Amino acid sequence: MSMKILVGCKRVIDYAVKIRVRPDKMGVVTEGVKHSMNPFDEIAVEEAIRMKEAKKASEVIAVRCYSTIQQETLRTALAMGADRAIHVEVPAKDCENLGPAQVSKVLAALARREGASLVLLGKQAIDDDSNATAQMTAAHLDWPQATYASKVSSCDGKLTVTREVDGGLETVEVSLPAVVSADLRLNEPRYATLPNIMKAKKKKLDKLSLGDVGVELRQHLAVVAVSDPPTRQAGVTVDSVDSLIEALRHAGRI
Amino acid sequence: MNNSITNQLRCALQYKNGYMNKLLKQTSTALFSSINSNLVVNDKSKLVSNPLFQSKGPSLCSTPALFLHKSQLHVSNCCAGQPLTQLNEDEIMLKESVRRFCSTSVAPLVSSMDEAASLDQGILKGLFDNGYMAIETPPEYGGSGLSFFASILTIEEIARFCPSISVVCDLQNTLLNTLFLKLGTEEQKNKYLPKLASEFTGSFCLSEAEAGSDAFALRTTASQDGNNFIINGTKMWISSAPHSGVFLVMANADPGKGYKGITCFIVDANTPGLTVGKKENKLGLRASATCEVHFDNVVVPRCNVLGEVGQGYKYAIEMLNEGRIGIGAQMVGLAQGCLDATVPYLLNRKQFKQPLYSFQVRTTLPFPSCSTASRSNSRSTASRYELPSPSFPAQPQADQTAALQLPGTNYPPLPFLLNRKLIKQPLYSFQCAEVATRVTSKCVELLGGVGFTKDLPVEKFYRDCKIGTIYEGTSFIQLNTIGKIVGMEYTRDAV
Ligand SMILES: Cc1cc2nc3c(=O)[nH]c(=O)nc-3n(C[C@H](O)[C@H](O)[C@H](O)COP(=O)(O)OP(=O)(O)OC[C@H]3O[C@@H](n4cnc5c(N)ncnc54)[C@H](O)[C@@H]3O)c2cc1C
C-alpha cells in the first residue's frame, strides 16, 4: 500500500512548565523555558508509525513550520520512527503570528506537494489550544475530516475512526485522502530508543521556504493583550455536609 | 512571603556570582584562551560542558542559568549562549528519553523494588530494549556507538530516579562492554557484545572475602590443564550475579608470581561448577542484587582468557579508573534526585505561616549543597575528557579547580595537583560521594518528619548514597591515592 502520511509536529512549551506572562503582556515567556513536541502531535506521530509498521502506510513524513531555530522536535519524530522530515521555514518576525489559519495553508500545500493521502495532526496544541488546524487543513484541501480520534483503522482506501464526543463514542468512516486529528486516548506514544536516536541522524530533513510551497502568510488576528487568569481565592475546609451546604448558601451558589 | 523567597534567591545568587567572579579572576587569560581553543580544536570537546568557559566569557557570570536545581538541561537547552551544561541535540534527546523511560517505567516501582529487594524484570528488559545497556558498543555488535560521555549522562539520569537501576546500567557499560571492547578478540566480541546489548547482564568478579580494598590479594586460582584452565575460589559482593549470562573473573593463573599472575577469564553462567550463592541483605541499593559467586572446578578453555595471561591486575586498575567516573555520575544523579524530591516540599509546606523554604537556615543549608551538586554534575559530564586524552590538559583543570574551592568543601584549592592526570578519578569519585552524602543527609533534615518516612524517596537516597564511598574503591582508598600523589608532588618539586 502506498499511503503517505503527513504528520504535524509543533514545538510548544513543555506541559510541566509553569507559564509566565511577559512583562509587555503581549505573549508568554518562551526564552529559557523547556519546550517539547506538542503531546497530541506525539500521539499523531505514534499512530502514523503504527500504521506504517502494520503495512498500512508507505511513508511517514514529519513536518513543522517555524523559524529555523530548534530542530529537535523533528529529530524526535524521526527518532520515534518517521521516515523523513520537512521543515518549512517561516521568517522569525512572522512566527509570533503563526496560527491555525497560516499553518493549515502550509500543511495543505505540503500534502498536495508530497501526494499524501492522510494528514494526521494533534487535535490541538497545548499552547494556544486553538483546536482548528486539522479542520482548516481539511477545508483547504477539500478532504473529509475525522477529528478527536481515539481509534483509527484503515481498510480499502477508507478509514474507520472512533471519535470521542460529548455523549460518548461516535464511529465515522472517511474515504482517503483525509485529515484526522488525534485525541489523548488514541495511543501511548513511544519514546526514542538510543539506537533509533542514532539512526535518526541519517534520515533526511528537508528545508523549504514558504515560497517553495507557494504559500503567502497573511495575518488575520492581532493580539491585544495576554494576561494571567485571576488568582484563585484560597479555599476553606468544611467538616460536614451540612456546613458545606451552609457555606455554599452563604456564598450564594445554591 | 514570596518576596522573601525572591530575596533569598537573590542573596544566594549574589553569593554564587561573587564566587564565580573570584574564580574567573584567578584564572589567567592565557588559560582561558587555551580552553577556548581546545574547544575548537578537539572536535570531541564540543560536547564538553564547561560551566565557566563557554565562549561568552566572563559576562556569563551573572546569568541565573548558573543557578541550577531542577532543570539544568532545560535551561542549557534554551538560554542560547548561557548554558550551564552544553549538551548537543543528540545528548538532549538521549537525556530526555532516559528521563521518560525512568518516569514512566522505573519511578512507579522504585519503592516496591527497594522493599522487596528485587529488580523488576520488566525494567531490566526496558534497559535493553531502549539501548541503555550498550551505549558505546558499536552498531555492528548491536549497540549505539555513542561516547563514554553518553554513558555517563545516562547513568546520572537514571540515578535521579533509582540508583539501583543506575548501577546495573553503569556496570554493564563502563566495565563489561568496555572490557570486551578493549580487550576482546573478534570472536569474543562477536559472541558476547550482542548478548550484553540485548539479553543479559554481565558481572565483574574481583572482590573476595579476603580481598576487598586489597584486591590483588585475591585467592581464586586458575590452574592450567592442557588447553584449559580450572578455576577455584569464591567471589564476594558480585553485582547483578543472578541475571548475568557471563562473568569476568579475576583469578590467579600463577600464584608464584603474586599479583602478576592475575588473569581475566570469561566464564559463561551455565558453566558446570559456577553457582551464584547467597544474596546480601543490604542497607541501600537493594534492588540491585549483590551475591557470592562460587567457582568449584570450573573448566574454561584457553580461548576464554580476556586479554593476556598475567595482565588481569592492569585491566582491573584501568577499568575501575574509568568505572569510578560512572560511580561519580551515579552519586551526582542521586543527589539531584534527592533535591528534586525535597525542594518542592519545602516550597509548599508552611510553618509559622511561611513556606519552610523561606527560613534562613533552610535556604542557606541546601544552596551550597545544591551548587556543589550542580558543579559536580557538570564535572561528571566533563570528566569524559579526562580519560583518554593527553591532548586535553587545560580544560578539566579549571573545572577541577572550581570543584576544589567550593564552599562547604573542606579541602583547600590545590591547583598544581590538577596537572596530574592520575589524581582526577580518585578526586572526582571521592567528591561526588561526599556531595551525595551531604545532600541526602541535609535533605532528610530539611524535610523534618516526612523526610524520615518512606512517603518521600529521600530516605532511600540517603541509604543508597552510602555505596558511593565503598565500591570500586572506598573513599579512604581514594584519599590514600590523592595523598600519595600530593606527597609525590612535594618530593619531586621540592616546593
Ligand atoms: C553493593 C555492592 C556491590 C559490589 N559489587 C561488586 C562487584 O560487582 N564486583 C566486585 O568485584 N566487587 C563488588 N563489590 C565489592 C567492593 O568493591 C568492596 O566492598 C570494596 O572494594 C571494599 O572492600 P571491602 O568491603 O573488603 O572493605 P575493606 O577492604 O575490608 O575495607 C574496610 C574499611 O577499611 C578501609 N581500608 C582498607 N584498606 C585501607 C587502607 N590501605 N587505607 C585506609 N583505609 C583502608 C576501607 O576504606 C574501609 O573503610 C561490591 C560491594 C558492594 C557493597
Image (spheres, coloured by chain):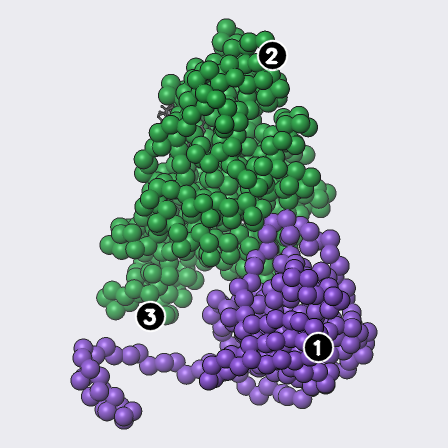
Name the residue located 49 percent from the left edge and 9 percent from the top edge: B255
* Residue A163 visible (yes or no): yes
List the single residue furthest toward the top. Answer: B256
Q: Position of residue B95 (x, y in %)?
A: 55, 52
Q: Is residue B334 left or right of residue B179?
A: left
Q: Nearer the viewer, residue B251 or A4?
A: A4
Q: Residues within 10 Å of mark 3 (few under 14, many from 20)?
A: few
The residue that mark 3 highlights is B1
Instruction: Report the mark closest to the observer, 1 or 3.
Output: 1
Q: Assess mark 2: CB under 8 A from ligand 1?
A: no
- Secondary structure found at label 3: loop
Question: What is the letter of the green chain?
Answer: B
Sooner in the amino-acid sequence: mark 3 or mark 2: 3
Query: What numbered label is drawn on residue B273?
Result: none
Q: Which mark is residue B227?
A: 2
Q: Which residue is mark 1?
A: A176
Q: Position of residue B373 (x, y in %)?
A: 45, 47
Disc 2 secondary structure class? loop
Query: Answer yes or no: do the residues labelled 1 and 3 have beta carbons within 8 Å?
Result: no
